[in-house]
Image: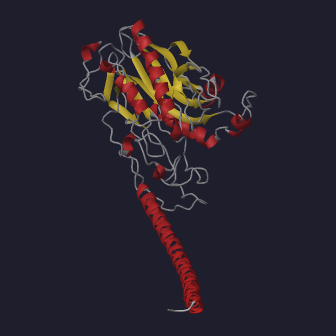
Amino acid sequence: MASSSSRNRRSVFRSGKVGAGVVVLIVLVCLGVVGGSTWLAKRSQQLAEDAVVQAREAAAKAQADAESKARESLKLADQAQPPSDPVPTTLDQAKAPQPSAGAIDTAAIRFGTRTTPRKSDVVRIATYNVANLFDDNDDPTLQDRYEDMNTTKPKEELEGIVDAIRAIDADVLVLEEIESVAVLGWFRDTYLSGMGYTEAISIDAGDPRGIEQGVLSRFPLAEPMVWPRMALQGKHPAGADAPEGEPITFHRSPFRVDVIVPAGARGNPRDYDFTIFAIHAKSGRNSGYWREAEAIGTTKLIHTAMSDDPGRNVVVLGDFNAVQTDASFQTFISSGLIDLFADRRPDDPATTTHESGRSIDHVLVNAAMMPEVIRDSRFVFGTPARPKGVDYRTYPAPKGYASDHYPVVVDIRPLEGGATPTTPQNQGRKPVDPAAK
């Protein structure tokens, strides 16, 4: 039997062996952790460097693709009058392409048409967003971010607008983005003398920037009306262009006015009347909900006008800031209005209405007015535009530039049921019944 001292020595010996083993194990683990950490750090650094290289390669490819697409876009020319000069391909933001000879740079006309035939017995109606038609007089009510002295329309752009207006020769011209009726009258008297625009009318639409819709007409105008800051459905959500939770109102009120084409003015035996609703919807990518609210409010006003006079002819036109598939535009179609460009292709440059390549300016009519529409007369009038993909803030405008929008035009025959419709289609693909009147 072992003695007590022997057992104690063996116990001490075993404990010493275990203790030493634990220490060795801890040292090995620590060394492994350190080594692993070093390997992970090196691996992470390598991955980060690889990611930087890949990002640079992707950015370079994206830039090359963008420039390639931009050059392709420059190949689009006017559909009826192709440019004879070579199309410039530079995307240098510091210098513009050299313009061709003449009053305008025809090589820069990427959208629309330059053909404007018309007959003597028609009334030509057009809408045109003229982009900040401000004069050089200071409006003391517009200050700080809305100071109007910074938005005076350059003389070169005024001349471009005049060239377009004289070319389309509309009898009734609806303009968006004008400063006031005083500026509209000044513009008419200074630049449009001899065109016969005896009527010039505009009313404050409630826009904080001071822009509104106006009408120039060769025929008498009556019953002008606006609804500035009229309450609409809903409240502003978070992240919008207005304080969250505030009630939605018209950003710019629609402008309603009646046009009277006197008997004999276009061979019509009797007076022919129609009502205009001039639209300039809220802009901005985050304002789709706002445009929908404006569309709902506007269609209610239109239906009120038609219920007061069931046979009333109505045309709704202007800058909708929406393409045909947008919910706000579809609100107008669902209300029974007819899109005169319903068959346009989204990628058709001949019917594109904005420099961005979108079609956001529209002309709609109600069923009562549809029989008077001359379907084949509709067109978008092209003016010079910057190349696709450049920054409009730094890239100079081409010669003859007028606006980032283009005039949209249609002719009507001012006689009830006077046009011979070719079974036009509305957005719902249902034939319009000419007998609906």
Question: Going 41% across and 25% down the picture, which residue do you hit?
Answer: 124
Question: Going 65% across and 27% down the picture, which residue do you hit?
Answer: 183
Q: Is residue 342 left or right of residue 188?
A: left
Residue 380 picture location, percent across and down: 41, 37
* Number of numbered markers: 0
Q: Is residue 343 above or below residue 87?
A: above
**In the rendered image, which quarter is residue 198 located in?**
top right
Residue 384 picture location, percent across and down: 50, 46
Question: How is this picture coloured?
Answer: secondary structure
Q: Is residue 77 above or below residue 25?
A: above
Q: Is residue 249 left or right of residue 311?
A: right
Residue 3 picture location, percent across and down: 56, 92
Which quadrant: the C terminus? top left
- Seen from the viewer's position, the closer of residues 392 and 181 is 392
Residue 179 picture location, percent across and down: 63, 29
Q: Is residue 220 left or right of residue 121?
A: right
